[in-house]
Image (spheres, rainbow, N blue to C red):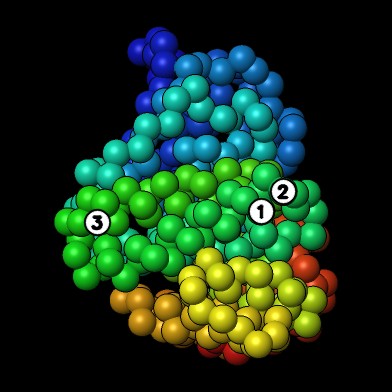
Amino acid sequence: ARECRAQAVIGLGGGSSLDIAKLVALLCGHEQRLEDIYGIGLAKGPRLPLIQVPTTAGTGSEVTAVAIVTTPSHEKKGVVSPLLYPDIALLDARLTVGLPAAVSAMTGVDAMVHAIESYTSAHKKNVLSDGLAVQALTLLAANMDRVLAEPGDLQARSNMLLGSMLAGMAFANAPVAAVHALAYPLGGHFHVPHGLSNALVLVPVLNFNRPAAEALYAQLASAVLPGQRFASPREACDGFIDFMTRLVARMPFAQRLSEVGVTESDINQLTDDALKIERLLINNPRPLDRDDIHALYISVL
């Protein structure tokens, strides 16, 4: 980009492509080393003008201030800065029509995780992020099965894309937590797509969080089960977790860590790496220690 004296950057693709576009615009606009800006608020501007065009309904990267990369040491590291927000985010559902079913499913669950973790985040949760998360989850839950059954349904595709964007806006305000912290080492070491790695650990984390998040999960039940009445918050929480469990189970992708190459001998390394992601673990509604993380990985091996 520097050699061709680029005057602007257009990101086109899934979350990884959009994240790279952010970094290209940033590093070309102000010379700095990538390894020096991992973390929060370390990047310097200005950056080149940036337009983001997502072709998956999942990451919401087109509206977030985060760029995630996998380092040579197999760690997932992030650059977090308001400079990474684009000038324009362009959503066109026609660009998602050709996605394989598995990719549509993985990215869709990823977006749902963004909404759920934002709504239950222990830090920065607010009225704005809650509204975005609920609307996102409502759209995603209502259209996920439809896009898999009818891949050419542009209205369903549009709803998924909008839900993904709203979920991205939600977690840009109230950050994600343990699902992502446990998912990142799976991507770093085993090159598991991000949406799939989230899906693999989602249900165990939901069940783990229940003692601390029952009331919040109960509130989300109306987003995924509209019109259904519950006798108590406990019953509503049951309904929400059961809905998410069933949804993940019927998706056309791997359901166990062993299916993506993880063995029991890998669990300690995954656990150690997840523990390092404190910036996400602190957002979880229920604190986790090493034994908790280890047990969560084992439960889906």
Q: Position of residue 40 (x, y in %)?
A: 74, 38
Q: Which residue is mark 1?
A: 130
Disc 1 from disc 2: Cα separation: 5 Å
Q: Position of residue 55 (x, y in %)?
A: 32, 45
Mark 1 nearby-residue class (10 Å; few <14, some 14–19, many ≥20): many
Q: Nearer the viewer, residue 32 or 112?
A: 112
**What's the residue type where badge 2 is placed?**
Val
Question: Residue at image x 36%, y 82%?
Answer: 250
What label does residue 99 carry, if any?
3
Question: Residue at image x 65%, y 29%?
Answer: 82
Can the viewer see residue 274?
no
Question: Residue at image x 61%, y 84%?
Answer: 230
Name the quarter where the N terminus is drawn. top left
- The earlier-in-sequence mark between 3 and 2 is 3
Q: Nearer the viewer, residue 39 or 157?
A: 157
> Looking at the image, is mark 3 or mark 2 nearer the viewer?
2
